[in-house]
Image (spheres, rainbow, N blue to C red):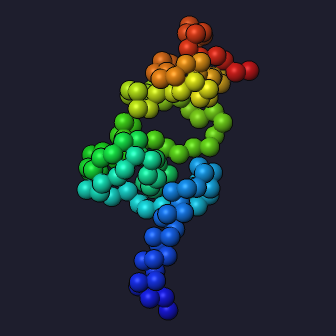
Amino acid sequence: MISRELAKKFRAFIEEMSMNATDKEALDNIIAYPKWEVGKEYEKDFRLRYDDVLYKVLQNHTSQADWTPDKAVSLYVKVSIEEFPEWVQPQGSHDAYMKGDRVSHNEKHWESLIDANVYEPTESVPTLWEEIE
């Protein structure tokens, strides 16, 4: 049987390795990431699980019951390796799209032409988004 001390060391090793994983590696090994907890201090770029979905922390904070990762878009972003993830309205500069980011919106694919893009991708904003055929 593994001793409690050895198990703690092994868990620390797993957490350290998981911080350096690519998004694909992280999604393939989601069980290695800790579950989200209320009242815990989270640092920017830390990855965690919530409802079997992997999230990345966008800014340092202490979690609260009403700031769950699926609702607090200014604090967390879903980890994704989709080439064209579904477009989500950014709440500010912390989660805005950067030049080259690709999204799917209204059954079309788009690429952001600017950094800090918070605008909805449509044909009416040709200087902000380019439709990808």
Specify the farthest residue to the bottom. 1
Specify whether 115 is left or right of 108. left
Residue sitting at 59 percent across and 49 percent down? 23
Q: Residue 119 at x, y = what percent?
A: 48, 18
Q: Quadrant of residue 89?
A: top left
Specify whether 133 is left or right of 119. right
Residue 66 drawn above or below residue 15: above
Choose between 81 and 9: the one closer to the eye.
9
Specify the farthest residue to the right. 133
> Can residue 79 be seen in this snapshot?
yes
Q: Residue 98 at x, y = what percent?
A: 53, 27
Residue sitting at 58 percent across and 10 percent down? 127
Choose between 43 and 40: the one closer to the eye.
43
Residue 77 drawn above or below residue 128: below
Q: Quadrant of the C terminus?
A: top right
Residue sitting at 53 percent across and 45 percent down? 79
> Can residue 53 be seen in this snapshot?
no
Residue sitting at 49 percent across and 63 percent down? 16
Q: Residue 131 at x, y = what percent?
A: 66, 17
Total labels drawn: 0
Q: Quadrant of residue 125?
A: top right
Choose between 62 and 120: the one closer to the eye.
62
Q: Residue 39 at x, y = what percent?
A: 25, 56
